[in-house]
Image (cartoon, rainbow, N blue to C red):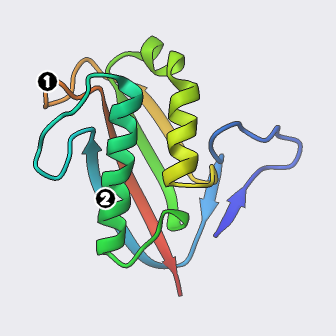
Amino acid sequence: MQVLLPPGWPRPKGYANGVAARGRMVFVAGMIGWDAQGEFHSDDLGDQVRQALLNVAEVLKEGGARPEHIVRMTWYVTDKREYVAAYPAIGKHFREIIGSFNAAMTAVQVAALVEDRAKVEIEVTAVIPD
């Protein structure tokens, strides 16, 4: 995997501008903050991010991938202000479960997610090197 940073651009905090990779691709559907039985244990955004990331890691594992193979993440959040306020908890959980911040990432606020209690949904693309 090669992180793409055009010359003279400042290094982004918490993501990469782009990533180039070659290998077997693994696509993870949007994961939300409920457990394997479809139950929420918290309405706290940080807690839901942690569970969603654990869910991502489990699906990656099923596909033979690991968190370091992630090249792209898209985060859908229901409240931008709550998301920004939760940066410390999100960063902690991200480092614990995913590790590095080298994926190309996008975060967008949405009006709602399909599951009423969900505050975040995370989609992932991973590439297992050849």
Q: Residues within 10 Å of mark 1 (few under 14, many from 20)?
A: few
Residue that carries the numbered disc 2 in the rendered image? 28
Vertical arrangement, residue 112 with respect to residue 24, above or below: above
Query: What residue sits 63% from the left and 49% below the top?
Result: 101
Rounded to the nearest angstrom, the CA distance separating label 2 from label 1 is 21 Å
Q: Quadrant of the N terminus?
A: bottom right
Q: Amino acid at mark 1?
A: Asp
- Place of residue 51 in the rendered image (x, y in percent of width and height, measured from the top left): 33, 43
Observer-side mark, 2 or 1, equals: 1
Query: In which image quadrant can residue 14 be found?
Result: top right
Contact, CB < 8 Å: mark 2 with mark 1? no
Asked which secondary structure carries label 2, the reply is strand
Q: Residue furthest bottom?
A: 130
Which label sits on residue 116?
1
- Place of residue 38 in the rendered image (x, y in percent of width and height, measured from the top left): 11, 44
Query: What residue sits 51% from the left and 33% below the top?
Result: 90
Residue 97 appears left or right of 102: left
Q: Residue furthest front?
A: 41
- 2 and 60: which is toward the camera: 60
- Place of residue 40 in the rendered image (x, y in percent of width and height, measured from the top left): 18, 34
Label whose residue precedes the other's in the sequence (2 or 1): 2
Residue 77 appears left or right of 18: left
Asked which secondary structure carries label 1, the reply is loop
Query: What residue sits 65% from the left and 48% below the top?
Result: 16
